[in-house]
Amino acid sequence: MKGWKSLLFTLLSAFFVWLFLRRVDLAGMGAVWGSMHWSYPLFFLLLMLPQYALRALRWGVLLKPFKPGVPFRSLWNYSLIGFMISYLLPGRLGEIIRPVLLAEKEGMKKSQTIATIVNERLFDLLTILVMFTFYLAVARNAASPVLSRLRTVALLLLPLVILVFFFILLANHPRVFPWTEHLVRGLFRLLPRRWREQAVGFALHFIRALRLDLGGRGMAAVAFLSLLHWAVILFSYWLLLRGFGIHPGLMPVVPFLAVVFVSAAVPTPGMAGSLDLAAAYALTGLFAVPEKTAAAFTILFHSLILIVPIALGLVALWHEGLSIRSLGRLRGKDELPAMR
């Protein structure tokens, strides 16, 4: 990532942090933490292990059309390395680094492994939207300005995500793919000739790799693992809220989960500022939590989210014989011939 982009994301993060901290009551937060039972954060941390395990298993299912039987250890290690990098550096770089590293280790095309990350994120978004829509259906009397805004966003995003899946299928249809190839080649005419064929080949392989050639069982497995993954996260959030004396039912935590999910997409280092503002906003708006309690929860919540993937990511680096310095020297390889 170029220096100016890193600087931009860092400044954006600093601005969000300032907005969050300017209203923080440090003495009040200390009192809140002192009254909390610390077994809740411990259980929250332990529940992060099955979250990443389920994510690794789902990644393995998405990779099956390209290479069946990718070892779970590789899926686990590179998932954690990717999240660690995304949390330490701006720009969500881990989302590119982890599929590239896996492709190099397992002898796969980088276009294919990167495509699985795109599908992974689409399934994440679709699962959150389905959970939120279900919550709205069973909690019709729930009303708040925050919930109303989330309802509007969900109504816009759900058909959009379905449309994205439809266009992926359409672009890869045998009768349509020649038009897709023609369009890609036209777009890449702007590149210098020495890079053009490689870029076109990569793009076409990537588009083909977006197809979910998983069959009925594979699709059901991805859907089930996605739902189970986010259900575990939902339960962990609900549990931590109870540690702070906040007692919504399990389903009312779904809107809070949705807000956190959206805020985590902002490419600031470690979600600094964006997650804090969003979580505090959701707590006060959804559950009428006092500001000092919301701030105390948010700071601990944010810290716990970062601890596990960063610590386990460092262990995963060691297992794979890598280092932070070696990740900075990653370079692409001319592995993708032009598709004709």
Image (cartoon, rainbow, N blue to C red):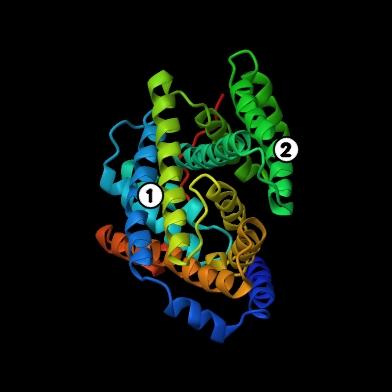
> 287 or 114: which is nearer to us?
287
Label 2 crowd (10 A; few <14 / some 14-19 / many >=20): few
Q: Residue furthest top?
A: 175
Splitting the image into 4 quarters, where does residue 61 fall?
top left
Splitting the image into 4 quarters, where does residue 24 fall?
bottom right
Label 1 crowd (10 A; few <14 / some 14-19 / many >=20): some
Q: Quadrant of the C terminus?
A: top right
Specify whether residue 202 is in view. Answer: yes
In the rendered view, tell whether residue 8 sits above or below residue 128: below
Please tell me whether mark 1 sits on a helix, a strand or a loop: helix
Amino acid tagged 2: Leu
Q: Quadrant of the N terminus?
A: bottom right
Name the residue tied to disc 1.
51
Q: Could you tell me which residue is drawn at 59 percent across and 67 percent down?
A: 276
Amino acid tagged 1: Gln
In the rendered view, tell whether residue 108 sits above or below residue 241: above
Q: What x and y, as percent, mark residue 153?
A: 71, 43
Q: What x and y, as percent, mark residue 101?
A: 39, 51
Name the residue tied to disc 2.
156
Q: Tag on residue 271?
A: none
Q: What x and y, as percent, mark residue 71?
A: 26, 41
Q: What x and y, as percent, mark residue 339?
A: 55, 28
Q: Of callouts 1 and 2, which one flags the residue occurring earlier in the amino acid sequence?
A: 1
